[in-house]
Image (spheres, rainbow, N blue to C red):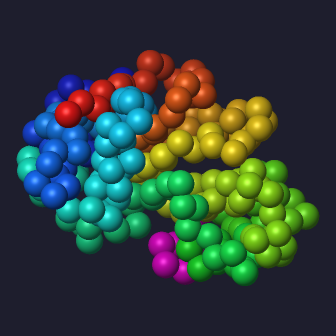
């Protein structure tokens, strides 16, 4: 159980985002501690992806307060600790899954005892490690992106529709990854249209509103 008095990993107070002076979402208030999973819920266009991109440091904070480990949030403070997986998978199409992972690990380091071959096998890409990503199916591309979750030592995962383009086995894989990450005192914010099946306790819910 998370102590009510523990310093949150991430905390938002009155967080908002504006586009052309028009609100996209907000204000939002939420906290996320190590060992917690939060589902970001809302209609299409409610700002779910925008929120995750903001938390990943890809968009600015317009209004409100955002803290990381009890200190004012900035992108450099959480570099390497936050991993964003969005609709654009961040893969270099002419490189192989192995090469893509080597680049990512060169930038952010790797978890102890993990390497590209082992994590690619775990996500179901054994035998495809050296195939150019552009030759992989949509589901295999998604699995190659998911392999970064296993390899990189980020504590906070920001996953935008991580179940897209996956079959039933792939959906179960994502749920296993989330459960193991949270059990290991990681945290995650996930947008989804209902594929989450989480057995580590009831997830938090962040409801988007304008």
| Count of numbered badges drawn on the protein | 0
- Extreme residue in the top direction: 202
Vertical arrangement, residue 75 with respect to residue 6, above or below: below
Q: Which of 146 and 154 is in front in this view?
A: 146
Magenta segment boundaries in residue numbering: 105-112
Query: Residue at position x 33%, y 50% from top?
Result: 50
Across and down, in percent, residue 14 comes to: 10, 39
Tell me: 19 left or right of 181: left
Is residue 126 something one can see in this rendering?
Answer: yes
- Quadrant in which residue 100 is drawn: bottom right
Residue at 24% x, 30% y is 209
Q: Judge by depth and name the residue closer to the eye, 9 or 205.
A: 205
The C terminus, quarter of image: top left
Give the position of the N terminus as an image quadrant: top left
Q: Which residue is drawn at 84% across and 73% down?
A: 131
Name the foreground residue: 40 vs 115: 40
Q: Return the x and y of residue 168 as percentages of the image width and height.
A: 76, 32
Q: Which of 67 and 182 is in front in this view?
A: 67
Q: Where is residue 6 in the image (x, y as percent from the top left)?
A: 21, 35
- Where in the figure is residue 19, as x and y percent of width and height? 20, 55
- Give the left or right position of residue 52, taking residue 126 as reference: left
* Residue 103 horizontal side relative to residue 19, left or right: right
Residue drawn at x 53%, y 42% is 161
């Amino acid at each position: 159980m998370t102590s009510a008095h523990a310093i949150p990993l991430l905390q938002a107070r009155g967080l908002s985002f504006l586009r052309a002076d028009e609100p996209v979402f907000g204000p939002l208030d939420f906290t996320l501690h190590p060992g917690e999973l939060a589902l970001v819920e809302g209609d299409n266009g409610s700002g779910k992806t925008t929120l995750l991109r903001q938390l990943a440091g890809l968009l600015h904070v317009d209004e409100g307060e955002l803290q990381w480990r009890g200190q004012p949030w900035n992108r450099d403070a959480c570099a390497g600790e936050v991993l964003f997986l969005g609709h654009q998978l961040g893969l270099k199409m002419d490189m192989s899954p192995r090469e893509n992972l080597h680049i990512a690990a060169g930038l952010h380091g790797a978890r102890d005892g993990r390497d590209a071959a082992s994590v690619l096998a775990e996500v179901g890409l054994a035998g495809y490690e050296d195939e150019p990503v552009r030759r992989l199916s949509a589901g295999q591309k998604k699995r190659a992106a998911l392999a970064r979750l296993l390899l990189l030592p980020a504590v906070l995962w920001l996953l935008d529709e991580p179940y897209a383009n996956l079959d039933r086995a792939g959906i179960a894989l994502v749920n296993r990854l989330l459960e193991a990450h949270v059990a290991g005192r990681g945290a995650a914010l996930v947008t989804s249209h209902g594929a989450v099946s989480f057995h580590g306790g009831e997830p938090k819910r962040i409801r988007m509103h304008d």
